[in-house]
Amino acid sequence: MTTALDNMGLEELTAKPEDAMRLASLATVEGQRIRAYGGEYYRYRMGDAVVVVRTAQNYETGESELCGMDVHAVSDCVWDCEIVDDISPADYSPLEKRLLVTGPSGDAAVVEVVDADVLPLFYPGTPIKLRMVGFPRRIRYFDSAASYLAAQSGQDGAEAAVLDEGGIFSIGYAQQGEAESAAPAMDENLVLLRGVVKDAKVGETYMGMEPMTTFVRVTVATSLGDVELCHTAEQITEEEKDLVRVGSTVSALCVLSGDAAVGELSDGVFFGEEQDLALLRYFFEHGGADRLRSAMHSECAYISEYGGTRVEGQEAVIAVLKGVEEAMGEGSCYFAYPAHLTGVDASEGQEPPRYHKGKGCLLLSEGGPERYVALCFVETDSLGRIRELHLSCDSRYNFERDQASA
């Protein structure tokens, strides 16, 4: 999403392919490395502007490959939200995500997620934190709500929608769902919002110690949380420049960008039983065995009572899981549900089961949502990485699906 550079007057940095490559190379050398499941991100700050380079590991050559570049900005606006749907376009790589998210207000917004692959899964209802920035395509400032209402009456089509204060309308996404629309085609990730300015300041960009551009940064209150809107002075009229101040009303048609590498994920992925099971759940339902590598110990073992196999070593385990992935089809696809053991039946004369009441696991179903075939357990090393992946069909285990997975 390098077009957002326009909002900070930095479009010249990617005007030519060789310019974009030069910027990406600089970011990978001098930027902050953020570890992801399927690769790495490099976050490079240029004053208040941020460039994030996506790289993926080629496991055949052993080399890291450049996948693309995103643009973000410095922001203190963090949303606590949950995923409604993963609406990523088909041409997005595993390191990119476009999500529809919501919050307590019930409003929903389409967000282009930066550093998305630090998240283990993308199911509806999954809570996430996003550091939020908005890049307006069009933006207007008003001295009052009445001025905003009067201006909206002169708009055409969906952009004439009158929003409540703090309202968000995923206008592009809504248009995609219309069977036929007389309005011109609109990008799915465009969002219309209205809010009150809580803070206004000048954004500055630098390359090293060399100043480059300035732009407008305004913090706007919305029903999902505050968002930092970034735009150039040229995007507004001379009359409206005097309204770039606290208390003014803003109406913006913009692309929202949310950085998922925030809080405990600020340096990238971390491991533990909960995260490992979430990652495995996504694998069993969507594939992507290579994404599990970073979460596995080099001497990881795979034990399947269901399949009667045991293999050891990360590469051997990945090979087995790729076989599982290749076999996934309509009649053999897996459904994976977070679950936990509620008890273990007594077994006189038999070796007691390995796991005990309260142990977390995945309940695997094959070929249908209720056709249970195995429980998936993990044992972790001191860093939380998977030391052993165990598929059990021991009937002595009593289990219950977790409420969140219903």
Image (cartoon, grey):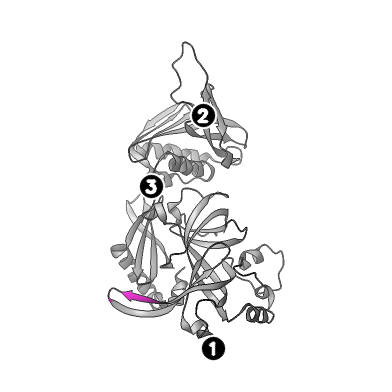
Q: Which of marks 1 and 3 is in front?
A: 1
Residue at the location (43% across, 65% down)? 76
Q: Is residue 199 visible?
A: yes
In the picture, measured across the screen, residue 380 lies left or right of residue 362, that is: left
Which residue is at the front of the view, 9 or 197? 197
Q: Are the residues flagged by discs 3 and 2 in contact, CB closer than 8 Å?
A: no
Q: SS for tag 2? A: strand
Q: Which amino acid does label 3 sit on?
A: Phe
Splitting the image into 4 quarters, where does residue 215 fall?
bottom left
Q: Quadrant of the C terminus?
A: top right
In the picture, measured across the screen, residue 150 lies left or right of residue 67, that is: right
Q: Which amino acid does label 2 sit on?
A: Leu
Considering only order in the chain, which callout, 3 or 1, is on the residue closer to the N terminus?
Answer: 1
Q: Is residue 87 visible?
A: no
Q: Residues within 10 Å of mark 1 (few under 14, many from 20)?
A: few
The stretch drawn in magenta includes residue 207: yes
According to the picture, the residue beneath numbered tag 1 turns out to be 239
Q: Check the image and report above or below for 354 versus 380.
A: above
Q: Check the image and report above or below for 394 versus 29.
A: above
According to the picture, the residue beneath numbered tag 2 turns out to be 341
The magenta stretch is 202-209
